[in-house]
Image (cartoon, helix red, strand yellow):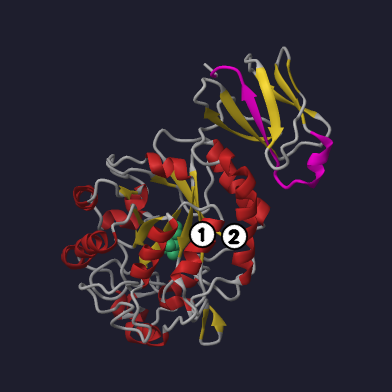
Amino acid sequence: MADATWFTNDRFGMFIHWGIYSNPAGIWQGKKITHEYSEWLQSSETIPRKEYQKLAGIFNPEGFDADEWIREAANAGMKYFLITSKHHDGFCLWPSKFSTYNVVDATPFQRDILGELAAACLKHGVKIGFYYSHWMDWDGSGGDVCMGDRFLAAEKRNPEYVRPTQAEFQGYWNNKCLPQVRELIELYDPWFFWFDSWNKDINEYVTPKHQDELIDLVHGMSDKCLVNSRINFEAPSEKCDFLSMMDNSFPETGFAKPWETSGTLNHSWGYHSLDFSWNSTEQLLKYLIGNASLGGNYQLNVGPMGTGEFQPAAIKRLREIGCWMAVNGESIYGTQANPIGKVPWGRVTMRSLPDGNTRLYLHLWNVTPGTALLVPGLKNTPISATVMESGQAALVEGGKEGIWVTAPIELKGIVLPVIALELRGNLN
Ligand code: FHN
């Protein structure tokens, strides 16, 4: 296993789903596609391969500016950046030697998108990682197909999308998956790989031996590069470095291993022009805070448009999150999980201070300004309590049941306020 300390400390990253499906954006032949995720277009409409691949010919995102994307991520307080190097359709966002179905060889754009993003990440001190669809690959190279017509009678199915034999899958594994992962490490030196699976079909192709082979390849080539558990969501190898929850899934308790939830801004991962179900900024922040309070990370997805730009609704939320992080980020980065158990008024994160004292970050979600809240069970002497956004001191006193902190009346004007409560000594 690689050292995942940086990952846990960083807590917050940007996920990007972007590809040739971002131009049709969830609409095919005038109709909304049947799968809710726009990146599933080829499958959902069982589009013949040649026809789907024509989308590469119109992929020309002239508004793409790697520096701008990474600046948005960094300004939102995100410390790392994750992008679909190859999603299920098989299209590659870098000039791969192992497939000409890539952004340089197959599109008028002809720019190495991953290369530009890797350079921008280096410039802004953001760590880059790659999503790589290791099991599914719909371009005919032997990966699993899992197409939309799978449950139709055999004669009605598109014969292009018959599931591969074991030998065909092995060919894909040896000649595309492993070489491309190797190539991505050699070219861009990523900090992590995010492999994807979510149903039992994975077991028919990716055996424990395949898993270990892929993880050993990554760890053998790079000391720092982490691997996530959705390489097999159900039975991940012990060698995985961090656990990935299922999509938008926020657990009630933490885990011994580093872990994360990847979630969407609205519903689809890829840009979907008819997806209007945006989460509020407050809800997105609550996902981040909630995971941090359980010792977990959060990766928030953006689906850039076919033009290469982020939608205004995405930018608005990223910037609002950034404003909150600018004053409250200390309560998230490098913190530990809540040490006092569930509290009715919000969430808690913690930091042990170099002087031996402890700082608890009280995230006040359900507190009426002017009332006192109990931080239960603590015997430590309180030193101070300070509203992070305003610097206002809050009244704090020890009691029989724990420590009482009075939420200042002025909290009325603060979104998701945090009070930093400093205590003498550690909590043991
Ligand atoms: O099928 C994919 C989906 O398109 C998307 O990439 C998500 C991200 O977690 N993973 C799969 C579904 O769980």
Tell me the tag on residue 181: none
Residue at 60% in and 75% down: 274
Quadrant in which the N terminus is drawn: top left
SS class of the residue under badge 1?
helix
Residue at 24% in and 75% down: 99
Residues under numbered marks 1 and 2 in contact, where contact means CB atoms less than 8 Å apart: yes
Residue hosting label 1:
73
Question: CB of residue at label 1: within 8 Å of ligand 1?
Answer: no
Cα separation, mark 1 vs mark 2, equals 8 Å
The mark nearer the N terminus, 1 or 2, is 1
Question: Looking at the picture, which amino acid does disc 1 mark?
Answer: Ala
Q: Is residue 368 above or below residue 246?
A: above
Would residue 422 be counted in the magenta stretch?
yes
Q: Is residue 53 above or below residue 364?
A: below
Would residue 399 be counted in the magenta stretch?
no
On screen, residue 409 versus residue 79, left or right, reads: right
Q: Note whether residue 72 is visible.
A: yes
Picture quadrant of ligand 1? bottom left
Q: In this picture, which residue range is highlighted in magenta?
A: 408-426
Residue at 55% in and 19% down: 427
**Residue 154's x, y, as percent?**
33, 75
Residue at 51% in and 62% down: 71
Residue hosting label 2:
318
Question: Looking at the picture, which amino acid does disc 2 mark?
Answer: Leu
Judging depth in this view, the residue of 83 and 270 nearest the camera is 83
Circle 1: is it few (<14), some (14-19), or many (20+) Cα within 10 Å? many
SS class of the residue under badge 2?
helix
Q: Note whether residue 146 is visible.
A: no
**Residue 324's x, y, as percent?**
64, 50
